[in-house]
């Protein structure tokens, strides 16, 4: 088969794809969620179980997404249709790609609101608003922000413009150029914060919290947490990785590349934990504060510490960069699809998307103030968008993609794109994508839905 070329361009090399996909995977949740669930569920023992889950669930599905994207060299909707037809099946598989693109669009609408909070805190930390504040003051600052819809709208707008400006630049002048700057910046900021934490925090306590091998905490619930995070952490089921895979050089190894991305995503999350939790423990704060850790607990910690204003500012810049790189990947599939199907320029496509997602984001941010009484199935708009995507659309996307790649894509297509022989390594992937991954994600889907609706 003659190799196809994407009309959008391609990554300059394998490492740009790795950095871009890692940027997609490393988001707001990585910085606070993974370190915390690790410490709460057995430390090193949890990391071991998590890595097994990544190898058997996350990596196989990610390989499947990249395989389909690179084979078709098109946006997820068109890629699913093309590869399905090549394998002798219905083009209606494009509906799975459509669900992924819609998931990314919906996630971005409320993700940009949270990223707006981060931008507000970057400015606040830079001005010294948190120097010497206590927990009550920090809580009041955050609550006042949530109640101020004008401020939320301004920061939400700024973030939408930041993201869509990059996507409008295309693969090489937009996504790749941004990746070359932002990902090294993210790593440097992370290492600076780690150094600060080692010198000013309770580093040994933070290390023990993250890595102490405590099998007694490794319950069945902990295994389910590891399983769930192994799926959600790699930006699967939303078309982002499939779109990025369509720009991947043909000569690059999909298996080795995906393994590198999974390793880097895990490493960034663990280093973030080592940077954050020693500071939390040094100030006798609660490591289990969840999202509140970022917007209430840590500002208090930085406000009380020597050099805290500078490093607090750098911390929120780090969070902002992580949010930015993730959000770009959420909007790229939709932009690529509009360009492919409606013969419009990227700039026009991005303006249309920006206006639409901005409007949906206004409804999401209104959940905390002027639309607080408006509910959908008993949830405000923000919570409904979160629920619909995280608990329904993404798991379903993961299930369908694994079934598609495992059962409907011709084996010879998979062997060709993966550049593998029919050996034990290939059959490990084949068994995982056909059986282990869809069953595991179905369990995640069922349990999450049960806990949300009944529990």
Image (cartoon, rainbow, N blue to C red):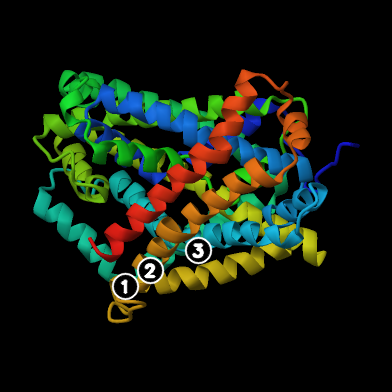
* Label 3 crowd (10 A; few <14 / some 14-19 / many >=20): many
Percent x, y of residue 403: 60, 47
Q: Are marks 1 and 2 in contact (CB under 8 Å)?
A: yes
Residue 246 seen by the camera: no
Left or right: residue 155 versus residue 197 is right
Q: Circle 3 is placed at which residue position?
A: 106
Q: Residue at x 16, y 43 (%)?
A: 300
Q: Give the Cα distance between marks 1 and 2.
A: 5 Å
Check disc 2 and report the residue beneath it: 384
- In the image, residue 437 sits, relative to residue 54, either above or below, namely below
Place residue 179 in its image quadrant: top right
User: Mark 1 and 3 residues: CB-CB less than 8 Å, in contact?
Assistant: no
Q: Is residue 271 visible?
A: yes
Left of 406 or right of it: where is 44?
A: left
Asked which quadrant contains residue 142, the reply is bottom left
> Mark on residue 379?
1
């Amino acid at each position: 088969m003659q190799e196809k070329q994407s009309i959008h361009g391609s990554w300059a090399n394998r490492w740009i794809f790795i950095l871009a996909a890692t940027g997609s995977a490393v988001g707001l949740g990585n910085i606070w969620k993974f370190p915390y669930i690790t410490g709460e569920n057995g430390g090193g023992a949890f990391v071991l179980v998590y890595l097994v889950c990544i190898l058997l669930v996350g990596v196989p599905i990610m390989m499947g997404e990249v395989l389909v994207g690179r084979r078709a060299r098109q946006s997820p909707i068109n890629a699913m249709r093309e590869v399905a037809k090549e394998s002798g099946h219905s083009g209606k598989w494009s509906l799975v790609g459509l669900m992924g693109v819609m998931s990314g669009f919906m996630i971005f609408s409320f993700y940009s609101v949270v990223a707006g909070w981060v931008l507000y805190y970057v400015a606040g930390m830079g001005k010294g608003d948190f120097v010497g504040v206590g927990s009550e003051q920090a809580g009041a600052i955050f609550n006042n922000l949530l109640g101020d819809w004008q401020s939320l709208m301004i920061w939400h707008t700024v973030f939408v413009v930041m993201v869509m400006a990059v996507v409008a630049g295309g693969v090489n002048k937009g996504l790749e150029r941004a990746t070359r700057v932002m990902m090294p910046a993210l790593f440097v900021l992370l290492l600076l914060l780690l150094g600060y934490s080692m010198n000013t925090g309770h580093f040994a306590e933070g290390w023990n919290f993250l890595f102490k091998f405590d099998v007694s905490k490794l319950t069945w619930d902990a295994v389910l947490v590891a399983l769930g995070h192994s799926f959600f952490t790699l930006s699967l089921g939303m078309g982002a990785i499939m779109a990025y895979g369509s720009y991947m050089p043909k000569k690059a190894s999909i298996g080795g590349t995906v393994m590198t991305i999974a390793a880097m995503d895990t490493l960034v999350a663990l280093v973030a934990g080592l940077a954050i939790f020693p500071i939390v423990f040094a100030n006798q704060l609660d490591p289990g504060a969840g999202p509140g850790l970022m917007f209430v607990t840590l500002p208090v910690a930085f406000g009380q510490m020597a050099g805290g204003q500078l490093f607090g500012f750098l911390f929120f810049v780090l969070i902002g960069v992580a949010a930015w790189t993730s959000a770009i990947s959420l909007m790229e599939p939709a932009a690529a699809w509009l360009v492919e199907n409606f013969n419009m320029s990227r700039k026009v496509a991005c303006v249309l998307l920006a206006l639409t997602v901005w409007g949906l984001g206004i409804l999401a941010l209104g959940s905390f103030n002027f639309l607080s009484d408006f509910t959908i199935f008993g949830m405000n708009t923000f919570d409904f968008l979160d629920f619909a995507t995280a608990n329904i659309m993404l798991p379903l996307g993961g299930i369908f993609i694994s079934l598609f790649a495992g059962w409907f894509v011709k084996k010879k297509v998979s062997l060709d794109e993966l550049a593998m022989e029919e050996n034990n390594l290939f059959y490990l992937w084949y068994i995982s994508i056909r059986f282990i991954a869809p069953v595991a994600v179905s369990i995640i889907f069922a349990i999450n839905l049960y806990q949300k609706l009944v529990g």
